[in-house]
Image (cartoon, rainbow, N blue to C red):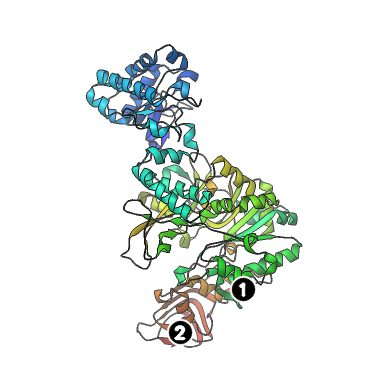
Amino acid sequence: ALGMSTCAQNVGKNDAGAFTGEWTAKNLLDINISWTLIGHSERRTKYGETDADVAEKVAKCQDAGLNVILCIGETLEEREGGKTDEVNKRQLAAVIPKVKDWDKIVIAYEPVWAIGTGKVATPEQAEETQAAIRAYLKEAAGASVADKVRIQYGGSVTPDNCSELITKPNIDGFLVGGASLKPTFMDIVSKVGPSKMVDMWPKFEEKMKKEELNESAIAAFKYTYGVLVSGADVMLPESKLDPVDKLTEYDKIREKPDPKLLRKTLILKLNGGLGTGMGLDKAKSLLTVTEGNTFLDLIAKQVATMKKEFKSDLKFMLMNSFSTSKDTLEALSKYTDLGTGSDLEFVQNKAPKVTASDFSPADWSAEPGHEWCPPGHGDLYPAMLGSGTLEKLIKKGYKYMFVSNSDNLGATMDLKILTHFANSGAPFMMEVAERTDADKKGGHLAKDKATGGLLLRESAQCPEEDEKEFQNIGKYKFFNTNNLWVDLMALKREFKKNEGTLPLPVMKNSKTVDPRDKASTKVLQLETAMGAAIQCFEGASALVIPRSRFAPVKTTNDLLALRSDAYQLTEDFRIVLAPEREGVPPDVKLDGMYKFFDAMEKLIPNGPPSLIGCKKLVIEGPMSLAKGVVFKGTVTVKNTGSTEKELAAGVYEDKTVEL
């Protein structure tokens, strides 16, 4: 695969020192920038850089060990005067004596008259000029140099002309300008980059079209697949980040809540997960939580309560998956005021699994459904676009969207936050919470050192040598709760700017094509995360919220705690920690044998134990809990045998109990 490196657009010609506004070669290397352009036409024409200046810069980079892309090329006047070869030779002649290590030099021929003008040299013209450049290198620097130095072409390269240009023997690659800022840059990569993209993408495209996936879904996967085959470095080392110190806190919001904003606001719940981690074959949101209510029941009742309180037609929708749509709509059919069909849901896309060995589409004829996977909740954005949901909402006057996971019952519509978001003018806002020791291995919020913008760093993006700092909760203080606020018009503008995609970071998960058969073909599942979009919006912000707005249910540990008296159901159908808990949930750790929902139910056949006074509960071995069990403080209950035993009713406080 093709590696990825960072390149500066210019470098100073000084050694290290106080040269305000300049970056030396050493400065660039210190921040992990390994390449720089030198001699770009704009530096020569607009800033008066001479051939001698360019040569001096190359010398400094050679001394420091910084790689150089040396730009040469003629103006329109020089070309029309028949001086193309003369100009290129003159510019090269100044530099050649300064080069000690040709492995650190790439030459880019950029006809100045073609840059950003839409004009382009024909493949024959470009080849003729670059052949002359190589011939001069052979004459002036030797055959070995001429043979190994890469010569790029850099004059208005586009997806339309790149395929023919790259076939020429003296064109070794491209210096792509404006086209590199557009998603169609991946079309250039697919045509001239790694052969896997060239060979395999048409197969993926055909497969997705056969499944009748829309253009937005195909474009989103093309982007993620292009990132995979390009070998793009997704790592975020410490050198690229700054910590986030100051953020607005929920308790410091002073705006007066404005109920009128509810008419312009969509509540969206992500509901595509089957809860397979708990052994379920249905939506996790259909699990009973408390007093006979499922997650969906509580969400529907929360929306109904707010509609009644503010006399507002509050809009509610779900992003379901193909697996959850039918059961979910049936469960919500009794709440007629929520809406039906496409007015209530849009469906998450699916993505092809990628064969790990050769990056081809996964093939599993025994069960073709296993050839597909969810593309991660970052698919929220292309799914909204491709389904027409985004445009419909905007046309109906909706401006804001609050999105959260359906298993996070703490994530309710908060008028105070909505008003703050609307008044801030931010295009995107993330609710974050303060990290604790329990959160230190999870992703965190940070600032991009280069742009100052906010971004997320996940554990998979952290180099091994930076793990200690990654887990430093005093430095990186905040994590993403996945409660997000989005300006719908800003989202539409980003799609237009990026030609129908959002350039989200790509996560690569290694699996087997049949998750139940570990001997089946190894595959890669490509996913994106919706919170990572914070880096796509200029001016995006974050809000520090109380932990009560983050109560997700990911495991049976979480579910057991949520069902206990450590949590209470409020009159507006929110589930909150009991006041006695002082904002700290009980830490429940069940034996692996209780990983699945059915097994957890057998552990508590008489209902959950009392955990209102429990700090930590550990359950080890086969057992069931009698009615009337109360845990306080830190308690461990063990059964080292293989036969199930019952823990009798009673109060167990700060002790280890062996059955």
Mark 2 residue type: Ser
**Crowd band around label 1 with a 10 angstrom C-alpha radius: few (<14), some (14–19), many (20+):** some
**Residue 413 appears in view:** no
**Residue 377: image x %, image y %?**
51, 57
- Quarter residue 65 falls in: top left
Q: Which mark is residue 568?
A: 1
**Contact? badges 2 and 1 (CB < 8 Å):** no
443 left or right, relative to 314: left
Q: Which mark is residue 624?
A: 2
Mark 1 residue type: Gln
**Crowd band around label 2 with a 10 angstrom C-alpha radius: few (<14), some (14–19), many (20+):** some
Taking depth in this image into account, of 607 and 617 the one nearest to the observer is 607
352 left or right, relative to 552: left
**Residue 274: image x %, image y %?**
49, 67
420 left or right, relative to 554: right
| Residue at point 43%, 63% (across, down) | 369
- Quarter residue 267 falls in: bottom right
How far apart, in angstroms, are the residues tagged by discs 2 and 1?
24 Å
Query: The C terminus lies in which quarter of the figure?
Result: bottom left
Residue farthest top in this picture? 81
The answer to whether 23 is drawn above or below residue 220 in the figure is above
Taking depth in this image into account, of 77 and 469 the one nearest to the observer is 77
| Residue at point 51%, 79% (across, down) | 631
Taking depth in this image into account, of 645 and 174 the one nearest to the observer is 174
Q: Circle 1 sits in a helix, a strand or a loop, which is it? A: strand
Sequence-wise, the earlier of marks 2 and 1 is: 1
Q: Circle 2 sits in a helix, a strand or a loop, which is it? A: strand
